[in-house]
Image (cartoon, rainbow, N blue to C red):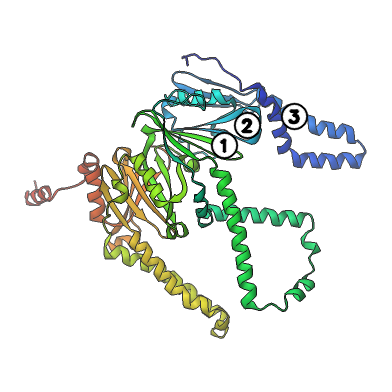
C-alpha cells in the first residue's frame, strides 16, 4: 500500500453478477411491464426495454464503483447520481469478513466487509468490497489486520487450530432459539408456497373431519405434537448444518499480537478475522433448553463492533459446555473468569426477581378471571394452576444466576434464566462505568452497573447489584478512573471535623 494509491475497480467478472442482481431487484416492475405490454400488444418492445434498463443499471454500478487502500485509510466510492464516498482510518478496522455466495464461488469471487464499528444499519454505509478474487481478498485481510496472507495454499507456521465442528453437535440445534426461528421461517415459506399453488384449496374440511372423527383426543394430540417436533427438529438441524458446515476456528500469529480466524458455511462460506487487540473478552450464552442439555455457545466481545454485527463475533456454535469453556479460556488466556465463584447480590436482589415475576403473573391471572368469568375456568384451569408455580421457578432460577466478580483482570457478570449469559470483559477494555437505577431499584438500594467499551454497543451489565458493591467493583477494576469520585472514610471524617470558614 502507498500513501497515494490509485483508485481500483472491482473484478470484471462482476459484470456477470450486477446485471442479474438488478433484474431480481426489478422483478415486480418487470412483471408489471410484461402485463402492460401484453395488454397493449407491444410485447417485444416493452419486454426488451424492461430487461435492458436493469441490466444497464447493473453495468453502470460496476463502472461507478471504485476503492483504494492507502497507508492510513480505506476508501470506497460508488454511485453516479447519488454519490457515496466512504472513508475510514486503518486503525478503525475491527474485523474483516470474507463471504462468498454460490454465485460468487462459481466465479471465484468474494465479498469483503470491513468492520469499523459503525452504528448504521444501512448497507450503503458499510465498507463492502463486493467482487474481489479470493486470493486478493485473503491478502487484503492480512494487510488490513497486519497479518500477512493466510489462505488454503499459504499456512503460517504458527497457525493453530483451536476448534473444528463435531457432527455430533447437531443434537443441540433444536434446543436453540435460532433453530426454532429457522424452523418457523421454513414452515412459513412452505405454507405460503402451498397456498400460492392452491394446495389448501384442494383440502376438503368435511372429509378431513370425517377421517379423523374416530380419533381420540388422547391419541391425536400426542401424534400431532410428535410430528411437529420431528419437523421442527429436522429443519433446525438442517439450518445448523448449512450455517456451520466446516466450522473451523484458528489463531494466527503470536498470542496477543495475532488474530482469530473463523471459517464456516455450506452454501455461502464466511471467513471472519478478529484482531487480538480488539478482542476484550467473551460471552458464553446458554438458553434454557441448551443449558438443560449441557450445551452453550460463545462469542467474543470486540471493542467497536456494532450490535448488528454480532454474527462476526461468533467463536463457537452451540456445542457441549466443556468445549465452549475451553474455547473461551483460550481467548481469555485463562479459564479463571469462567470457573471462579461469583459474589451473590444479596436478599434484596433475589426478592426483586420474585417480585418482577410473580406480580405481573398474578395481575394477568386475575384480569383473565374477571374478563372470562370464573364459570369458564373449566377450560383453562390448568394454565391458572401452573402460572404462579412456573413464575416462581423462573424467579428462583434468575435469582440463582445473579453474580459478579473481578478475576484475573476481568470483570465477570452473570444473569438470566431463559437465556443465561456469563460475560468476562478485560479491564483494559473498560473505558467507563454507568450506574443506572429505577425508582424501584433505589428503594431497594440496588443499581445496575454497566461497563462500557470503546465504540460499538457491546458492554457488560451487572444487574441489580447493591450500590456499595457496585462502587467497590468499579473502583477495584479501575481505581484511577473511579477514585477521584470516591470519598474515603478518613477524608469524609476530616471534612466533617473541619470548621466552616
Q: Is residue 272 left or right of residue 275?
A: right
Whether residue 435 is visible, yes or no, is no
First reached walking from the N terminus: tag 3 or tag 1: 3
Residue visible at 53% across and 43% down in the picture: 244
Residue 434 percent coordinates (x, y): 33, 47
Relative to residue 421, is residue 367 depicted above or below? below
Residue 145 percent coordinates (x, y): 43, 27
Say the numbered circle drawn on residue 55. Answer: 3
Proximity of marks 2 and 3: CB atoms separated by less than 8 Å: no
First reached walking from the N terminus: tag 2 or tag 3: 3
Q: Which residue corresponds to mark 1?
A: 269
- Mark 2–mark 1 distance (CA, rounded to whole Å): 9 Å
Proximity of marks 2 and 1: CB atoms separated by less than 8 Å: yes
Q: Residue furthest bottom?
A: 375
Q: Which residue corresponds to mark 2?
A: 105
Proximity of marks 3 and 1: CB atoms separated by less than 8 Å: no
Local packing at callout 1 (Cα closer than 10 Å; few below 14, some 14-19, many 20+) is many
Whether residue 109 is visible, yes or no, is yes
- Mark 2–mark 3 distance (CA, rounded to whole Å): 22 Å
First reached walking from the N terminus: tag 2 or tag 1: 2
Relative to residue 214, is residue 462 depicted above or below? above
Which is more toward the observer, 37 or 167? 167
Residue 124 percent coordinates (x, y): 58, 34
Local packing at callout 2 (Cα closer than 10 Å; few below 14, some 14-19, many 20+) is some
Say the numbered circle drawn on residue 333. Answer: none
Amino acid at each position: 500500500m502507498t500513501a497515494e494509491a490509485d483508485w481500483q475497480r472491482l473484478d470484471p467478472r462482476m459484470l456477470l453478477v450486477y446485471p442479474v442482481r438488478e433484474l431480481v431487484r426489478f422483478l415486480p416492475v418487470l412483471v408489471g411491464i410484461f402485463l402492460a405490454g401484453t395488454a397493449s400488444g407491444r410485447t417485444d418492445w416493452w419486454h426488451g426495454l424492461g430487461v435492458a434498463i436493469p441490466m444497464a443499471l447493473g453495468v453502470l454500478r460496476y463502472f461507478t464503483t471504485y476503492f483504494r487502500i492507502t497507508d492510513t485509510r480505506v476508501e470506497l466510492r460508488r454511485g453516479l447520481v447519488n454519490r457515496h464516498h466512504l472513508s475510514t482510518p486503518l486503525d478503525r478496522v475491527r474485523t474483516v469478513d470474507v463471504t462468498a455466495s454460490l454465485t460468487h464461488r462459481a466465479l471465484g469471487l468474494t465479498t469483503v466487509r470491513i468492520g469499523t464499528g459503525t452504528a448504521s444499519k444501512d448497507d450503503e454505509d458499510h465498507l463492502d468490497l463486493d467482487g474481489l478474487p479470493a486470493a486478493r481478498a485473503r491478502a487484503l485481510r492480512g494487510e488490513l489486520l497486519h497479518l500477512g496472507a493466510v489462505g488454503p495454499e499459504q499456512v503460517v507456521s504458527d497457525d493453530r487450530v483451536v476448534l473444528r465442528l463435531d457432527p455430533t453437535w447437531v443434537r443441540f440445534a433444536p434446543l436453540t432459539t435460532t433453530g426454532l426461528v429457522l424452523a418457523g421461517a421454513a414452515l412459513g415459506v412452505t405454507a405460503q408456497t402451498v397456498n400460492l399453488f392452491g394446495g389448501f384449496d384442494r383440502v376438503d374440511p368435511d372429509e378431513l373431519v370425517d377421517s379423523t372423527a374416530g380419533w381420540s383426543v388422547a391419541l391425536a394430540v400426542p401424534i400431532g405434537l410428535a410430528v411437529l417436533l420431528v419437523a421442527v427438529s429436522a429443519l433446525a438441524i438442517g439450518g445448523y448444518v448449512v450455517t456451520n458446515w466446516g466450522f473451523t476456528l484458528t489463531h494466527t500469529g503470536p498470542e496477543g499480537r495475532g488474530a482469530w480466524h473463523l471459517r464456516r458455511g455450506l452454501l455461502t462460506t464466511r471467513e471472519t478475522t478478529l484482531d487480538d487487540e480488539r478482542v476484550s473478552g467473551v460471552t458464553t450464552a446458554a438458553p434454557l433448553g441448551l443449558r438443560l442439555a449441557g450445551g452453550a455457545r460463545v462469542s467474543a466481545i470486540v471493542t467497536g463492533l456494532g450490535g448488528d454485527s454480532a454474527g462476526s463475533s461468533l467463536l463457537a456454535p452451540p456445542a457441549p459446555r466443556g468445549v465452549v469453556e475451553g474455547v473461551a479460556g483460550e481467548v481469555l488466556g485463562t479459564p479463571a473468569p469462567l470457573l471462579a465463584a461469583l459474589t451473590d447480590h444479596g436478599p434484596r436482589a433475589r426478592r426483586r426477581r420474585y417480585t418482577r415475576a410473580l406480580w405481573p403473573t398474578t395481575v394477568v391471572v386475575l384480569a383473565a378471571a374477571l374478563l372470562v368469568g370464573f364459570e369458564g375456568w373449566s377450560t383453562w384451569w390448568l394454565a391458572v394452576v401452573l402460572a404462579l408455580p412456573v413464575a416462581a421457578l423462573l424467579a428462583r432460577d434468575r435469582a440463582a444466576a445473579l453474580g459478579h466478580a473481578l478475576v484475573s483482570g476481568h470483570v465477570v457478570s452473570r444473569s438470566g434464566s431463559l437465556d443465561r449469559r456469563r460475560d468476562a470483559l478485560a479491564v483494559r477494555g473498560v473505558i467507563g462505568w454507568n450506574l443506572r437505577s429505577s425508582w424501584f431499584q433505589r428503594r431497594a438500594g440496588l443499581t445496575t452497573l454497566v461497563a462500557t467499551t470503546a465504540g460499538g454497543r457491546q458492554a457488560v451489565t451487572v444487574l441489580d447489584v447493591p450500590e456499595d458493591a457496585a462502587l467497590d467493583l468499579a473502583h477495584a477494576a479501575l481505581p484511577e478512573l473511579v477514585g477521584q469520585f470516591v470519598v474515603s472514610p478518613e477524608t469524609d471524617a476530616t471534612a466533617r471535623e473541619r470548621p466552616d470558614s
